[in-house]
Structure formats: C-alpha cells, structure tokens
C-alpha cells in the first residue's frame, strides 16, 4: 500500500448499554498503533476524534420514528459526520482506518464509500442484524449491518441505508451470538454468514477465503469491519460485549493477513471497534487491535 493511512477516531458509546468503548480509540493509539503502521513502512496521519455527544446530556428515548432505538438522532449525527470524513479521506487518496467506539459507527463508514460498489467483510461474534422494530435491547450497536442493507425502517433512511452495498457481497465471519428476531432477517437477506462452527470445521483461512470471494465479486471497494469481540475473551478481554468460544490470537492474524494477500488491491477502509479499556488487562486488547490493523495492511511473516 502506498497511500497514507488516516486514523479517524470515533469515541462512540451511545449504541451500547455498557460504558467504556468511548475510550477505545485512545487505548488503541496508546497501544502503539502508529508505531505498528510505521514499522511496515506506512505513513500514519492521525485526524483526531470526531465529536460525539455525551449520553449524560441526552435522552436515550428521543424520537425514533415510532420504533425502539436509543440515542437514534445522536447516532445519525455521528454517522453522517463519519461518512463525510471517510469520503474526504478517500477523495484525498488516503486510507481511512476508523477506530471505535461501538459498532453503530459502521453505518457511517459504509456510507462514506457510497460513490462505488462496496463489498463488506463483517468480522464479529454478533450478527448486528436487528432493526428498531425487532431489537430486544434498543441498542443501535446491534443494528448496523441491517441498517447498511436497508432492513426494516432503515430502508427509508438515506443516512443509514447504503444502496451501493448489495447483500450478495456481504460476508459475516465468526458469528456465534444471534438473537432469534435477527436470525430470520439475516437468513432472508442474501448475506452470507460463517459461524464459529464453520471455522471449527474448515479452518479460519478457508472461511476467510470464501468470505473474501463473496465480498469482492464485481465490486470496486472492500470495507472490513473488525469487532474485537470476535476473539475469545481469553485473548481479548477488553471488549464491549464478550462472548466465549471465539477465534484465537493466531487465527485473527491469519484472517487479516489473508485480507491483505487476497484483497489488498480493493481494500478501501478498515474499522476496529468495541475495545473497552475499562474491562481490559494491561491494554492487551487495544494493543492487539493495532497489531491486527498492521496485518491487514501488509505486515506478513515473510
């Protein structure tokens, strides 16, 4: 990669119940992100953090078009701001590396690439396929992929639905926690989901190769969103919503290395989300996030 990497921090925790992921961008930086990127010859430009409203100053049950979604208008404002920043970075021939914050920010990252056809690899323990009509919690960090694909009421919201993303080019990897209400929506959507059982049966490299083949078929750009909770909590304890039974440290690096080898020419945005330093141990999850970013952007063993 010859492009400079522009780091965009989004200290967002409006989309989740548990506090702390708003400190994720700072923790990842402190964990040595810039050093990791510069070590492999990349120029790292830090664009700072986007402004995000404080939940203490807002009403979580504000207007949501009659549906259940906490901090809905605030989430819209942050995602629109992020979409603009991602779009500006791409226009300036810089690679956007987005640091969360909770996973609701994926709506903004995807919409920032809206000028061309985009495929998505969504690496996450959760499906993130709820809508305001189906959510059991009202937390928007459980909705971003449904929003991007225009499911439910999101189909009428231009800030959320990214019509340049076809569900046929969306791959979920590492799923192991799916709400009953989102299972049907996901199954009917046309997106492809690879569970931890698939990874157990086939191995992470085979699964990721299939996911990339699906996501990059007839697209102009690839967007990879990596939720650190896809790793087992023994490897990454500092995440917003930990789920036992995840991938290992080595599997995570193997997956990211494969992204670089097989799809580095179309990779146009990378996002790392849900790092919660309040729950972390010696900043190990944040440090891992920086290492994984380097693997996706060209850090190979040989």
Image: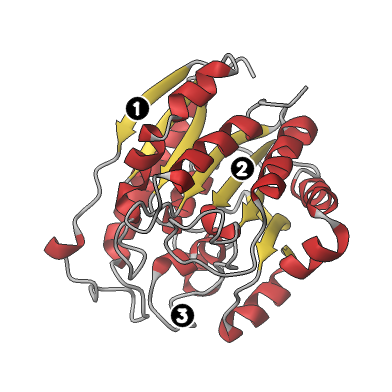
Q: Residue 15, image x and y in percent?
A: 36, 64
First reached walking from the N terminus: tag 1 or tag 3? 1
Q: Residue 202, image x and y in percent?
A: 87, 59
Judging depth in this view, the residue of 174 and 69 nearest the camera is 174
* Quarter of the N terminus within the rendering: top right
Q: Residue at x 51, y 17 (%)?
A: 38
Residue contact between numbered discs 2 and 1, judged by CB atoms under 8 Å: no
Q: Is residue 39 visible?
A: yes
* Circle 1 SS class: strand
Numbered badge on residue 38: none
Image check: 23 left or right of 162? Answer: left
First reached walking from the N terminus: tag 2 or tag 1? 1
Numbered badge on residue 135: 3
Within the image, what quadrant is residue 55 found in? Answer: bottom left
Q: Residue 86, image x and y in percent?
A: 45, 35
Q: Is residue 158 visible?
A: no
Judging depth in this view, the residue of 272 and 53 nearest the camera is 272
Image check: 211 left or right of 137? Answer: right
* Quarter of the C terminus within the rendering: top right
In this figure, which colouring scheme has been used for the structure? secondary structure
Residue contact between numbered discs 1 and 3, judged by CB atoms under 8 Å: no
Within the image, what quadrant is residue 233 found in? Answer: bottom right
98 lies above or below 233: above
Q: State the separation of the CA atoms marked 1 and 3.
A: 34 Å
Q: Residue 267, image x and y in percent?
A: 66, 34
Image check: 207 left or right of 30? Answer: right
Numbered badge on residue 47: 1
Q: Residue at x 27, y 59 (%)?
A: 74
* Circle 2 SS class: strand
First reached walking from the N terminus: tag 3 or tag 2? 3
Numbered badge on residue 223: 2
């Amino acid at each position: 990669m010859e492009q400079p990497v522009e780091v965009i921090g989004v200290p967002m925790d409006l989309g989740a119940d548990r506090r702390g992921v708003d400190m994720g961008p700072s923790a990842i930086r402190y964990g040595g992100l810039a050093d990791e990127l510069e070590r492999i010859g990349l120029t790292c430009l830090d664009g700072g953090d986007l402004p995000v409203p404080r939940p203490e100053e807002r009403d979580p049950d504000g207007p949501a078009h009659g549906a259940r979604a906490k901090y809905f208008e605030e989430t819209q404002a942050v995602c629109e701001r992020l979409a603009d920043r991602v779009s500006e970075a791409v226009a300036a021939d810089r690679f956007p590396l987005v640091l969360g914050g909770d996973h609701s920010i994926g709506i903004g990252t995807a919409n920032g690439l809206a000028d061309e056809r985009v495929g998505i690899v969504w690496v996450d323990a959760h499906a993130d396929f709820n809508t305001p009509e189906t959510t059991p919690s009202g937390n928007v960090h459980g909705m971003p992929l449904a929003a991007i694909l225009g499911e439910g009421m999101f189909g009428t919201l231009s800030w959320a639905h990214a019509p340049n993303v076809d569900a046929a080019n969306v791959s979920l990897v590492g799923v192991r926690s799916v709400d009953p209400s989102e299972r049907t929506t996901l199954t009917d959507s046309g997106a492809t989901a690879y569970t931890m059982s698939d990874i157990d049966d086939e191995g992470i490299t085979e699964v990721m190769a299939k996911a990339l083949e699906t996501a990059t078929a007839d697209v102009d750009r690839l967007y990879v969103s990596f939720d650190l909770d896809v790793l087992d909590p023994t490897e990454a304890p500092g995440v917003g919503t930990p789920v036992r039974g995840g991938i290992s440290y080595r599997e995570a690096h193997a997956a990211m290395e494969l992204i670089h080898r097989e799809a580095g020419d179309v990779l146009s945005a990378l996002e790392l989300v849900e790092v919660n330093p309040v729950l972390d141990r010696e900043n190990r999850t944040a440090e891992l996030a920086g290492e994984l970013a380097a693997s996706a952007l060209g850090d190979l063993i040989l």
